[in-house]
Image (cartoon, helix red, strand yellow):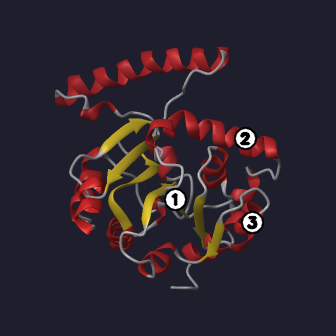
């Protein structure tokens, strides 16, 4: 419903939430881009002409990264007009003020090569989430990928991320994301990785080393209690990559 708390917070997300951490400076966007690149570098498309779509793009941090790395065809969509205005100061690609499901439903099939959905899927009710993923799979070209960052319910600290925002509906596990991928007809090979500290200086190196010790303790806890490490993804947020079924090369050959 348009008069719901969820809708009110989302439409004015810059005022209610994002504006407290966002800074309209080049340094801010560079810092965000560098952090995202350390996590996502090998998950970005190999082709710089890939059609890239950022769902719930916010102030354009992911789109900024893509453009900085040489991607020439980017689109961001978000429900908050003020966030899009901020994004427009730093990104050159298309920015669309729309609900992400409505936007996806209007897109032609196989019209996108890469979709990013960072910190958005947890905001969606389960039925709507399923529809968003189904539509994302439809609009992706065969072999195209969707990359997401979501709260990790398996993490001992996952409750913090789950309840950090009043519009968060739930958190994820590797198991329920595989269920979602199957329901949306993505490839069964769902990839996960930790949103962990990555060494790029002295302090981050220390954090990275300490995290490895900490995660060993978490793994040991799971081994003692249930006899398995539960896929070994323990950070508060986790990174997920889904692939649209089909081989892009085969699809291209068949269409000739």
Q: Mark 1 sits on what residue?
A: 52
Horizontal side of residue 218 vs 79, given as left or right: left
In space, the residues marked 1 and 3 are separated at their CA atoms by: 27 Å
The local secondary structure at tag 1 comes to strand
* Residue count near mark 3 (Cα–Cα under 10 Å), binned few <14, some 14–19, many ≥20: some
Residue 16: image quadrant is bottom right
Which of the pair 60/163 is nearer the observer? 60
User: Vertical placement of 106 versus 188: above or below?
Assistant: below
| Sequence-first tag of 1 and 3 | 3
Q: Could you tell me which residue is drawn at 56 percent across and 85 percent down?
A: 2
Q: Could you tell me which residue is drawn at 59 percent across and 65 percent down?
A: 76
Quadrant of the image containing the C terminus: bottom left
User: Does residue 207 show up?
Assistant: yes
In space, the residues marked 2 and 1 are separated at their CA atoms by: 19 Å
The local secondary structure at tag 2 comes to helix
In space, the residues marked 3 and 2 are separated at their CA atoms by: 22 Å
Q: Could you tell me which residue is drawn at 44 percent across and 35 percent down?
A: 235
Q: Position of residue 120 (x, y in %)?
A: 50, 60
Q: Mark 3 sits on what residue?
A: 15
The local secondary structure at tag 3 comes to helix
* Residue count near mark 1 (Cα–Cα under 10 Å), binned few <14, some 14–19, many ≥20: many
* Residue count near mark 2 (Cα–Cα under 10 Å), binned few <14, some 14–19, many ≥20: some
Q: Mark 2 sits on what residue?
A: 30
Horizontal side of residue 136 vs 91, given as left or right: left
User: Vertical placement of 2 versus 134: above or below?
Assistant: below
Horizontal side of residue 2 vs 190, given as left or right: right
Q: Nearer the viewer, mark 2 or mark 1?
A: 1
User: Tags 2 and 1 in contact by the CB under 8 Å rule?
Assistant: no
Q: Nearer the viewer, mark 1 or mark 3?
A: 1
Residue 84: image quadrant is bottom right
């Amino acid at each position: 419903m348009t008069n719901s708390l969820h809708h009110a917070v989302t439409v004015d997300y810059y005022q209610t939430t994002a504006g407290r951490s966002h800074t309209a400076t080049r340094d801010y966007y560079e810092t965000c881009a560098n952090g995202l690149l350390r996590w996502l570098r090998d998950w970005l498309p190999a082709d710089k002409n890939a059609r890239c779509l950022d769902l719930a793009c916010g102030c354009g941090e992911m789109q900024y990264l893509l453009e900085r790395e040489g991607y020439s065809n980017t689109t961001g969509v978000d429900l908050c007009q003020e966030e899009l205005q901020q994004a427009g100061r730093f990104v050159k690609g298309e920015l669309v003020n729309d609900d992400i499901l409505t936007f996806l439903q209007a897109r032609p099939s196989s019209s996108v090569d890469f979709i990013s959905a960072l910190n958005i899927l947890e905001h969606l009710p389960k039925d709507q989430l399923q529809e968003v993923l189904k539509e994302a799979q439809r609009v992706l070209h065969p072999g195209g990928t969707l990359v997401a960052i979501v709260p990790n319910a398996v993490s001992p600290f996952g409750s913090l991320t789950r309840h950090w925002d009043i519009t968060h509906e739930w958190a994820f596990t590797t198991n329920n994301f595989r269920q979602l991928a199957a329901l949306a007809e993505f490839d069964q090979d769902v990839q996960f990785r930790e949103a962990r500290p990555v060494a790029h200086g002295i302090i981050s190196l220390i954090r990275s080393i300490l995290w490895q010790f900490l995660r060993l303790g978490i793994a040991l806890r799971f081994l003692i209690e249930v006899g398995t490490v539960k896929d070994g993804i323990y950070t508060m947020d986790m990174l997920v990559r889904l692939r649209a079924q089909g081989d892009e090369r085969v699809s291209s050959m068949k269409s000739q």
